[in-house]
Amino acid sequence: MASVTLTSQSLGIAGVLLLTIVTIETGGYYLTRVARGAVALTDFQKAFARAGHAHAGVFVILSLVVLPYADAVGAHGFWGWLARTAIPITAILMPAGFFFSSMGKGRTKPNALVALIWIGALFLAAGVLTLGILVLQAAA
C-alpha cells in the first residue's frame, strides 16, 4: 500500500480547517437555541441558518478529504493552489451567503449577499474539477 506524506501547505490548511470546527460547533449550539424558540427567526431565516451550518460542516470535511489527493498527485503551482484552497474558500463563501443574506429582523427573502452562495459554488466547481482532472491524469 502506498503512503502519502502531506506537504507543509496541506498540513497548514488542515490545521486551520480543524480549528474552524469549533466555530461550526458554536453554530450548532445556536441552532439548538433556535429550535427551542430562544431566538426568534422567520421560517426563511431558520432554513438559511440550517443550510449555512450544514454547508460549512460538509465543505470543511470535504476540504480535509481532498488534501491527501492533491499531495498524492504532486499538485503544485497555480493548479496545486486551486486544488487545495478552492474548497476551503467555498466553506467560507457559501455559509456566509446563507447567513449574511438572511440577517435582519423579520427578513423573509435574501438580500444581495446571496450572491456569495453562487460565488462559493464557482470555487467548489473549480476545486473539484481541477483536482479530479489531476487525479485522472495521475492514474493514466
Image (cartoon, rainbow, N blue to C red):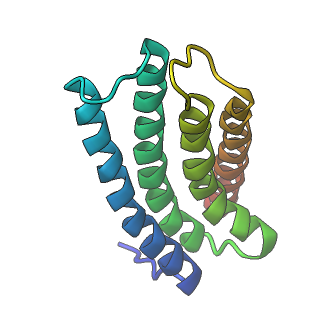
| Quadrant containing the N terminus in the rendered view | bottom left
Front-most of residues 134 and 89: 89
Which residue is rendered at x = 56% and y = 13% of the image? 108
Residue occupying image coordinates x 52% and y 72%: 13
From the image, which quarter does the C terminus lie in? bottom right
Q: Is residue 114 or residue 6 the one in the foreground?
A: 114
Q: Is residue 21 above or below residue 122?
A: below
Give the vertical position of 61 relative to 118 (above or below).
below
Residue visible at 47% across and 22% down in the picture: 45
Given the current orientation, which residue lies at the most extreme front position? Answer: 105
Residue 73: x and y, percent?
A: 61, 69
Q: Quadrant of residue 85?
A: bottom right
Q: Which of the two residues, 117 or 63, is positioned nearer the viewer here?
A: 117
Q: State left or right for residue 31 relative to residue 89.
A: left
The one of 53 and 79 positioned closer to us in this rendering: 53
Q: Residue furthest left?
A: 36
Residue 79 occupies which quadrant of the picture?
bottom right
Name the residue rendered at 44%, 58% in the picture: 65
Left or right, 43 with reference to 9: left
Q: Can you give x and y, in whole percent of width and height, for residue 77 in the image?
A: 78, 75
Q: Position of residue 23 (x, y in %)?
A: 38, 56
